[in-house]
Image (spheres, rainbow, N blue to C red):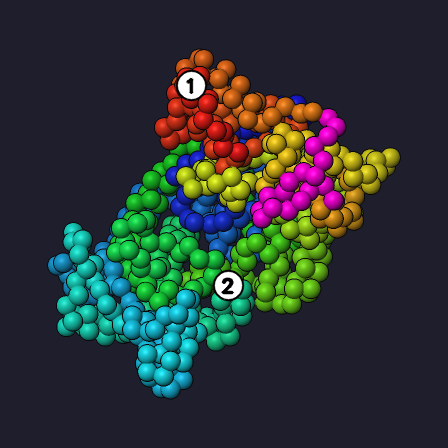
Amino acid sequence: MKNIITPVEAKTHPAGYLLHKYWTRKPHNVLSHFFSALTPPGGVMIDPCCGSGVSLREAALLGITSYGFDVNPAAALISSVTLQPPELSEFTTTMTSILEGLEPLIDKAYGTSSNKIRYAVHETVSECSCGHDVYFSIALKEGRIYRCPKCKSRVNFNLESLKKTRVVGLAYDGETKLCDLASVLASQTILSNKNFYRNIKEYNQSFIENRRILSFAGLHLSDLFTHRNFSLLCALADKIHALKDSRVKRAALMMLSASVVQCSRLIPYRNNMTTGGPAWSVPGFWVPPMHMETNPLIHFKARFSKFVRGIAELHQKPLKATASVENVDAVSGIETLTKSAIKADLVFWDPPYGDSVPFLEFSFIWNCFLKKLPELSLDVSVSDRMSKSQAWEAYKTGLSSISKALKANLKKTGKLLVTFNNNDTRAWQSLLASIQLNRFWCEHVSFQVPPVVSAKAQFAVNSSYISDLYSVFVPAKKNQQYGRSMVPVIKALEACAKSRSGRIPKNLAYRVASIAWLEGNISYDLISELDPLIGALFEVDDDYLVLKDMGGRVVPEIRQIALEVATELLKKGPCDWADIHSGIAVKTRELGIPDTGELRPILAPLLVFKGQRCYAVKTEEKYEQPLLI
């Protein structure tokens, strides 16, 4: 296990893994590092919740036969393209023909063929209880509340209350100023409310109610689009579904699903689009009162270019072993392999993180266009489509069933690699219970930071960007019993806090406690004691914890270690920030490895930075300024 103790700095994904915006895509080089260390040559790897298929491909590139399962049709589709991309020339020829054939219809729908419309800006109109149509731009605003200018009653500008929209601006190709000519806007409002293709019913499925993500009873897919754009997307979908070449068809469907959200009402219009690009950034189906309707051809062509680059990149590295994916639930997939006497040397398990991301509900917008909806009863997550108590019980049961199936499949010398990130103790307890009750023993834990962190997160001490714990488990021996002493957790928390002058972010405390818990193989049933334990050790200061007693063992300070590592590395010349972070991670494993959001404020006053490159330690006089902790 020594060859995986040293932290690995995650790299950004190559083009082949960026064809679709799917969640929880793990750093490919980190997965490859673990797979290589944990799997024998020519071995077998299983990923029961494979998502976008990065794990399956990275294993196959190493000569490891890989099997993946996912109950989400969109995930299975993405994985299949990742593993078996179409021939580039065939895909390019086919999609070029489809897009060229669709262009006249799109031009007709947008009422132009010369000066192309890039997008239309829509304003939401709601009906007040007094019967008055209230346009968002004329509503009276009191804080976050909007009122009817006629009767002063409260008016909601959301999808559930939406009566209609009107176009209030148009952006043309090559022009920075929006067109606001009344006659043109009126014409575009009429066009946006027309269907330009008949076969839309097949795709217009109804959402399941989930109030947490603003999915309400009676919500249909078409409600997220203008009539114009929804009908155009259905026209493209029909052309793709008619394709005969299965690989080209899968890639084309993946390209379609990767583009549809950008053509929806979910894209807010802000600041004349001068600050950042359009994106679906709210974790729910929220239609902003001022939103965009983007010409689909723009996104199709842009995504087409990305697909050409991505598919070409996937073909550059041929797989050295077979890799497959099935659109089935984890337990069914694993049990089928077991019955076929196919057993794993390594299982990579990235389980659903409790209630953090309702994958199937979010994927509904993609799966409708794939004409393949998932069986929600097979989903292992905590969703608001049922009561919280029912959801958490189903989550716990689901994880246990998967763990039991994995235990039956794993070879005697096999290993279970689990990656997880959730500070909710209910989620941790459910996962750890499923692992320990099926007699797995933790051998190693690594903390992994993401490959890309926004500038905002880098300088936010309590940054909330995603990081992961990678834990390696093996079948427990008969004499190995799970611990009940909390001392390892207490020592780890105290060392972490003392190395930071006694004050640490809450998320860091939970991460350090989780690592100590796993390394100590402490019993899952004690996790309910973690919050009271933290309360006994620390005072709460907003999002921070302050250690009550700084006495006892003295530990090195994180800022001193960080400066020493950076100084030593920079003696050899300029280096990447990733090299400095990796060096610090090696030295601080027992103190709680600091993430980028903690380190950058500490080192920013002391080092010469430009982006992700470090050039030198500043002169001694610079050290006189206060250090940021």
User: x%, y% of residue 537?
Assistant: 72, 41
Residue 538 is one of the magenta-drawn residues: yes
Mark closer to the chain start, 1 or 2: 2
At x 60% / y 26%, what residue is drawn?
557
**Quick one: label 1, few (<14), some, or many (20+) residues within 10 Å?**
few
| Mark 1 element type | helix
At x 29% / y 67%, what residue is drawn?
122
**Quick one: label 2, few (<14), some, or many (20+) residues within 10 Å?**
some
User: x%, y% of residue 133?
Assistant: 32, 81
Q: Quadrant of the N terminus?
A: top right
Magenta part of the chain: 536-553
Number of the front mark, 1 or 2: 1
Residue sitting nearer the eye, 519 or 262: 519
475 relative to 264, above or below: above
Residue sitting nearer the eye, 74 or 356: 356
Residue 45 as seen in the image, left or right of residue 133: right
| Mark 2 element type | helix
As drawn, the label of residue 621 is 1
Residue 204 is one of the magenta-drawn residues: no
Q: Which amino acid type corresponds to the residue marked 1 in the rendered image?
A: Glu
Residue 408 as seen in the image, left or right of residue 173: right
Q: Quadrant of residue 397?
A: bottom right
565 relative to 179, above or below: above
Residue positioned most to the top:
572
Residue 168 as seen in the image, left or right of residue 61: left
Q: CA distance from mark 1 to mark 2?
A: 52 Å
